[in-house]
Image (cartoon, rainbow, N blue to C red):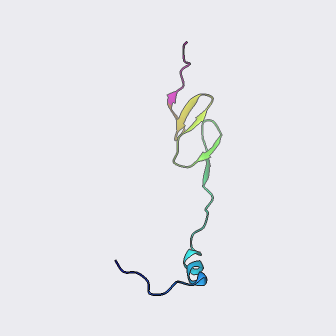
């Protein structure tokens, strides 16, 4: 395996890392519930799981 002959400077490493940024996730408003959620993800509202404005699954109460 090739190894560097000399140590990379801190400035060289910092130049490489300048492109790594934190990006805020895009939010959308659901057409049926009106809630904000992360795009292209299912979200829960009032015990129901919604995706693209449609109910995908409902939460059933657990009987003891």
Identified at 54% across, 78% down, the residue is: 16
Count of marks overlaid on the render: 0
Image location (x, y in percent) of residue 40: 51, 48
Residue sticking out furthest to the bottom = 6
Q: Is residue 63 magenta?
A: yes
* Residue 62 forms part of the magenta stretch: yes
**Which portion, as a residue range, is magenta?**
57-64
Q: Quadrant of the C terminus?
A: top right
- When asked about the image quadrant of residue 31, the answer is top right
Q: Position of residue 48 (x, y in %)?
A: 56, 29
Question: Residue at 58% of width from left, 35% of height from top?
Answer: 44
Q: Position of residue 1 (x, y in %)?
A: 34, 77
User: Residue 56, relative to residue 25: is it above or below?
Assistant: above
Q: Nearer the viewer, residue 29 or 6?
A: 6
Front-most of residues 52 and 41: 41
Q: Residue furthest left?
A: 1
**Residue drawn at the location 61% of the way across and 49% of the way down:** 28
Magenta highlight: main SS: loop
């Amino acid at each position: 395996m090739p190894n560097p002959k000399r140590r990379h400077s801190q400035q060289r490493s910092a130049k490489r890392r300048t492109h790594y940024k934190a990006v805020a996730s895009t939010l959308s408003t659901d057409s049926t519930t009106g809630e904000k959620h992360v795009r292209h993800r299912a979200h829960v509202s009032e015990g129901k799981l919604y995706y693209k404005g449609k109910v995908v699954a409902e939460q059933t109460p657990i009987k003891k």
